[in-house]
Amino acid sequence: DRQVPGTQLVLDVRFDQQRNLNAVTIIRFQVFAPEGYSFPSACLTDEEAAKPDRLFIQCIGTFNIAELIARETNIKGSKSDLVTRLFVQSPKFATASSTWSMNAEKDNANFAYQSGTIDGFELAAMPVSFRMSNQLGLLRPSFATIH
C-alpha cells in the first residue's frame, strides 16, 4: 500500500531459507530499510506480537534497521512459511535508493551468515493542481494515496 510520507506502514517480510540455519544459542536477522524509513523501537505489529507461534520473539528498531530475534535456533522454509509483519514509518522525502536488505547472523557472530537484497518502489514528487468549479484552487506541495 502506498501512503503519504511519514506514515506508519505495515511491512511484510518474507524470505526463503533453503538450508537449515542451525545455531547453538540464537539467530538474529537485520532488515535494512532505505534511507529515510524508520522502524519504531518495538517493531513487531500488534497482530504479529500476539501470535503464539510467531517466527520472531522480538523486533528492535533503530532508525532504518530492524533487528529480529528468532524464536527457534533452527530455521528452514519458504516465503510462504517464513513471514513476519513489522511497523515502519515511510520517509518524509523521496529517497535516493529503494533497496532493502536482510542479513542473518547466528550465535552472536560478528559477520552475516547470509544476506540478500530487493528493490522496493520509488517515492517521487509530482506536480499536481487542484481545480474546483473550473477555477484554480491552489498550487502547493501535496500528497495523495493512489490505489
Image (cartoon, grey):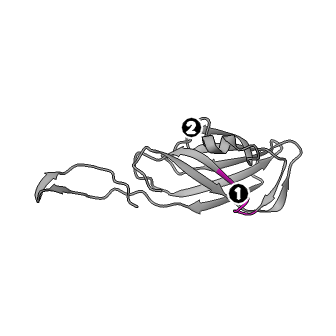
Residue 44 coordinates in the image, percent (x, y)? 63, 42
Amino acid, disc 1? Ser
Q: What is the secondary structure assignment of the residue under circle 1?
A: strand
Mark 1 against mark 2, which lies toward the viewer? 2
Q: Is residue 82 magenta?
A: yes
Q: Is residue 77 left or right of residue 23?
A: left
Residue 42 coordinates in the image, percent (x, y)? 62, 36
Q: Are marks 1 and 2 in contact (CB under 8 Å)?
A: no
What range of the chain is rendered magenta?
78-84
Q: Is residue 37 magenta?
A: no
Disc 1: CA contacts within 10 A as few (<14), some (14-19) or many (>=20):
few
Task: Tell me the distance, in whole angstroms, between the alpha carbons under discs 1 and 2.
Answer: 23 Å
Residue at 85% x, 59% y is 20
Q: Residue furthest right?
A: 24
Q: Is residue 15 left or right of residue 12?
A: right
Residue at 73% x, 47% y is 54
The quarter of the rendered structure image containing the C terminus is bottom left
Q: What is the secondary structure assignment of the residue under circle 2?
A: loop
Q: Which residue is mark 2?
A: 40
Residue 15 coordinates in the image, percent (x, y)? 69, 59
Q: Which residue is mark 1?
A: 115
Residue 18: name its quadrant. bottom right
> Which circle marks residue 51 in the picture?
none
Mark nearer the N terminus (1 vs 2): 2
Amino acid, disc 2? Pro
Residue 19: name its quadrant. bottom right
Q: Residue furthest top?
A: 41
Residue at 52% x, 60% y is 120
- Label the magenta part by its dominant secondary structure: loop
Foreground of the two, 76 or 65: 76
